[in-house]
Structure formats: C-alpha cells, structure tokens
Image (cartoon, rainbow, N blue to C red):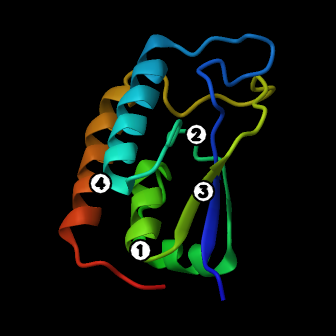
Amino acid sequence: MQRHLFHRSAKDHSRIQGGHELSLPRLVGVHVFAWLGRRLLGRPITDPTSGFSAIARRAVEFLVQNTPHDYPDLNVLLALHRAGLRVVEVPVVMRPRRAGKSQLRGLAPFIYLPKMCMYIWRVYRAPARTP
C-alpha cells in the first residue's frame, strides 16, 4: 500500500487570487522555510507555511501522536518525511480571507519563528518514527 500526504503550495508568491500581496514578514517566512524545506526534504517545497493540506488517514493518525498542534507547517512535512510517508505539493488557488484573522499578526511572527525552528530541531534530533 502506498503511503502519502498531499501538501499544497502555489507556484508563485502571489498565492491569493486577485493579486493580493503577502506582507513582508510572511514573504520572508515563506522563502526561509521553503529554502530550509528543500534542503531537509531534498525536493522542491515552495510554501510550507500555509498549513493547508490534504492528508491520508494513516498520516493523520501519525501526526496526532507525533507533532505539536499549534503550527502545522514545515515541521509536519519533515516529521512525515522522516516517518517514510510521501510528501507531495500540488498547486491550488488561494483566495483572500473572508472571515477571521491570521494567527500570525502583531508580535506572533516573532514567536512563530523560534517555535518552528525548535520544532524542526526536535524532528531531526529524535529517532525517526514510523506510522
């Protein structure tokens, strides 16, 4: 049986339909974590920060037990990769938010960055787990 995760990402930086631009901190974060993801996964990763994913049941069961729940981004992709699950990006059209607010506003990006670095370090420090 083939194990996989389908993770989405757009192919350019104007991910949101209608020409909406990303904020500078978000754009920097996308580039930094995409670069790091390409290095650690050994495959193209264009935006691991959206948290928008379609995930196979086996991968969900693994993630519930093995990853933090607050920022499901590059750390999740790396944990799945180390567990032997296939991670694939597919493009989607993103539209502007109609309701709610981003959790990455105000000082939150300054909390997100060190937390994500710590989560990534933990994934690579721990022995690889299997689903």
Quadrant position of residue 84: bottom left
Q: Residue furthest front?
A: 43
Which residue bears the numbered disc 3?
88
Which residue bears the numbered disc 4?
120
Q: Is residue 90 left or right of residue 78?
A: right
Residue 97: % across, % down:
75, 26
Q: At 51% across and 78% down in the image, what residue appears?
A: 62
Residue 76 position (above or below residue 20): below
Q: Looking at this view, is 86 or 120 the one in front? A: 86
Q: CA distance from mark 3 to mark 4?
A: 19 Å
Residues packed near mark 1 inside 10 Å, few (<14), some (14 to 19) or many (20 plus): some
Which residue bears the numbered disc 2?
50
Label 2 amino acid? Ser
Residue 88 position (above or below residue 36): below
Residue 69 position (above or below residue 100): below
Residue 88: % across, % down:
60, 56
